[in-house]
Image (cartoon, rainbow, N blue to C red):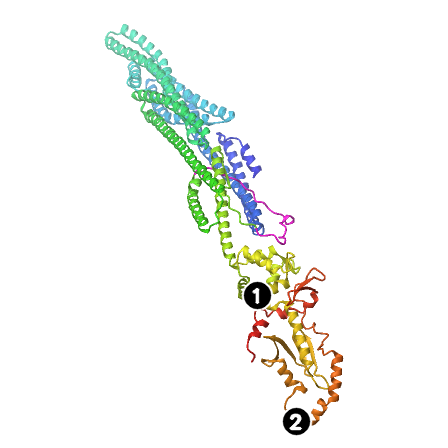
Amino acid sequence: MAKCEETINTLPAPSFILDTVCAQLQEHRVLVGEVQSYGERKTSVETAAMRLSELSRKEDCDVVQNLIMTVRDRYKKLLQHSTDRGKTLEDVKRHAKQFNESWHLLVDWMTEVEQTLDTHKEIAVSQEEIKQQLAEQKEFQKLLRSKRPMYEACLKSGRSLQEKAQSPEDTQHLENMVSELRDSWDTISGKSSERQHKLEEALLFSGRFTDALQALNDWLYRAEPQLAEDVPVCGEKDLVNNLIDKHKVFQREFGKRASCIRTLKRSVRDLTRSSTADARWLQEQMEELEGRWEAVCKLSVSRQTRLEAALQQAEEFDGMVHSFLDHLSDVERVLKYGVLPEEEEALLAFRTCHQESMSSLNAQQTALENIHKLGEEILSSCHPDSVITIKSWISITKTRYEEVQTWAKQQAERIQTTLSALEAEREEIQRLLDWISSAEESLNLKEQEPLPEDLELTADLITQHTDFMIEMKGKVPEIENATKSCKHKLVPKQQVSPSRKAPAKRRGTAKPPPSVPLPLEKLDPQTPMMSQLVSQWRKLWLLAHGRQSRLEEHLQRLKELEEFANFDFNFWRKRYMQWISHLKSRILDVFRSIDRDQDGRITHKEFIDSVLASKFPTNSLEMTAVANIFDVNGDGFIDYYEFVSALHPSRDPYRKTIDADQINEEVSRQVSQCNCPKRYQVEQISANRYRFGDSQQLRMVRILRSTLMVRVGGGWTALDEFLVKNDPCRVKGRTNLKIKEKYLSPDVFEASGRRGSAKGLTVSRSNSSLSLYSSASAPSSPLTRKALLRRSFSGERCIRPRSSIAALGSDHFSADIDSPSPTEEAERPPT
């Protein structure tokens, strides 16, 4: 397309020579075919761009679309340029063809006529033949006069093409053609007049004096009306030039007939001397001829003078009209296509230029009046063929002046309207600046006052500030209307490379508070006053939102303090456990969701931020107190066991250990009362789970109201009752004497007593008691052996290794919510 555009721009102007313009048109058709052939390539490029856009990023799609739009626009302009040149060439070819055909017809006809005139130069001798030749010459004169309109039209067309031609070769060629046409016509006219003069002289010398005198009188009769004073000769320049050319031809013919007049005078003198009969009549005819000749001569001179004056008048009118229209075009170009500037200083300078243009336009009023006056003067004695042309020029000048004057008035109105709008905008901006300054001063004074510690006063301050915010937001349409003339900044899209992505959020980092959207951020003010308005409005906007945030935070803090005064951790814990139960989650899942790095412990900030972000109904003060309660050892971290013990005091793992020791001691005490020769076996398998006797069934043992209970079937039984039923030495109502002697003999009792004392009356423990409850589900600690605090009933603290509570696995705590706690279950009456 660049090559084709360059080719079109370097093409020569259309030629007004028929052969040349036909060649140019043929070359242009080849170029148009080439341009149209590239339409298929453009379509393929658009198809490829469409497929590429489907597979590309949005930024790349924008680039591709911009490129395609550029290609379409350039191709469209290329087609338009080629089409316009084609139309211009066709129009030039049509005019050149019309002129060329007319020119060839006239030149061929004149060449043939000239050859005919050259072949018929001989003048007949007899009077009859001379009369016949004179009649034929008169017919030829009529034919020549009938061809004159065609000649004048062709001559005018050639001059028009000559004025439009741009190349010197075309101008010279057209000038040669016009000159050849004019010379040929003048030659034919001269030869025709000369032949007629010779025929008239021959007729005179042949003795036909009366016929010659009548022919001369007839010619003078025909010429006299055309030269009359009342025949209008004014008009446009081309018409006056044609009239001058005609009159020159007449003057040449008139000069040639002067010899005929002299010959007639001699003949009349000779005839009056020789014959007195017709002398008086001949003398009267000759005097009449001489009088008419003198009159025609005077009329010819007068017409020449009037034609010269008409030509001067026509040239003056033509110059005034074209100068007037050119000046109007210059003024119109400034008024119609001048863009109003947006800045006030530039607009004032533009108004000054416009006023100068208006002064120049008003000065043209005199020129228009002169044109109309001269036009009316020409119309008073205008040739009929030029009346329409002169009237059209007068109408065109008047219409153009009114049109340009209308444009000038509209431009003046637009300038005045724009200046008024700028003045109103300046006043509006000043009013907004005053309001912003007063509002900013009021806010600064309020900011200097300390915030009250009373909820009602703080609520009143928030209400007042809310009213101010409503008033400020009501000013937003006014601000937008005042800044609508500002241009928008071009913010390029920033692409973040994968290697420069933002780092992952670290532990303990809180989500930043939402920033206040900055108003008028994309505006680019051009004037200092507009910049001041935008900057002060942004400052007031941020100041108002900042105060609103501080008041809301202060009110929230006061409410939290009021609520925190009646804070009950047990009530908070129950609400939190209910909330976890509503989510159908486990405590382990909640802890793991907070512990992002899975190191088995969380910071106070992580715990507080997580609970506040989970939409659990609480506040930061409560959460600070809760975090301190959760952190038993005060090391700044909350591990899983502290988390569970705080949420389940009855399932405190340290408390579990103490209960298990008490159960073990109580079971040992009860078993030590066995008197059987073979002591009743009780084996502890795991925490609170024992195997009694030879049975393989495990039974759960718990403390209920200071009573040790054993799980039997679907209910609970006291340990002493269970031993009475299962320990052989405690079975009541047995009558088997052998059994009594076997188990209750004094020897056996003493032996068993010695064995029991030797064993220390202890309950045996299984080596695999920890294998049933794995600690894999509990969060691991980064410490190899973390020191934990264990609380005893006496309030003393001792260090207990973590391995002693490793039995608290997922099976034990998975039922924290669904299964009742030991204390709650113990409070139920046994079945």
Towards the viewer: 341 or 383: 341
Q: Nearer the viewer, residue 689 or 524?
A: 689
650 in relation to 230, above or below: below
Q: Is residue 765 magenta?
A: no
Q: Quadrant where the C terminus lies?
A: bottom right
- Sooner in the amino-acid sequence: mark 2 or mark 1: 1
* Residue drawn at 62 percent across, 75 percent down: 702
Residue 335 is at least partly visible in this image: yes
Which residues are drawn in magenta?
482-511
Of residue 765 and residue 492, the one placed in the foreground of this image is: 765
Q: Marks 2/1: CA distance?
A: 58 Å
Using a 10 Å C-alpha cutoff, classify the residue at mark 2 as few (fewer than 14 neighbours), some (14 to 19) or many (20 or more): few
User: Residue 8: where, in percent of width, then height?
Assistant: 54, 35
Seen at 49% across and 25% down, the residue is 171
Rendered image quadrant of residue 643:
bottom right
Residue ID at (55%, 61%): 569
Residue type of the residue flagged with mark 1:
Ser
Relative height, residue 377 to residue 759 (above, below): above
**Pointer 2 residue:** 735
Decide: few, some or many residues near mark 1? Use Cα within 10 Å; few <14, some 14-19, many ≥20: some
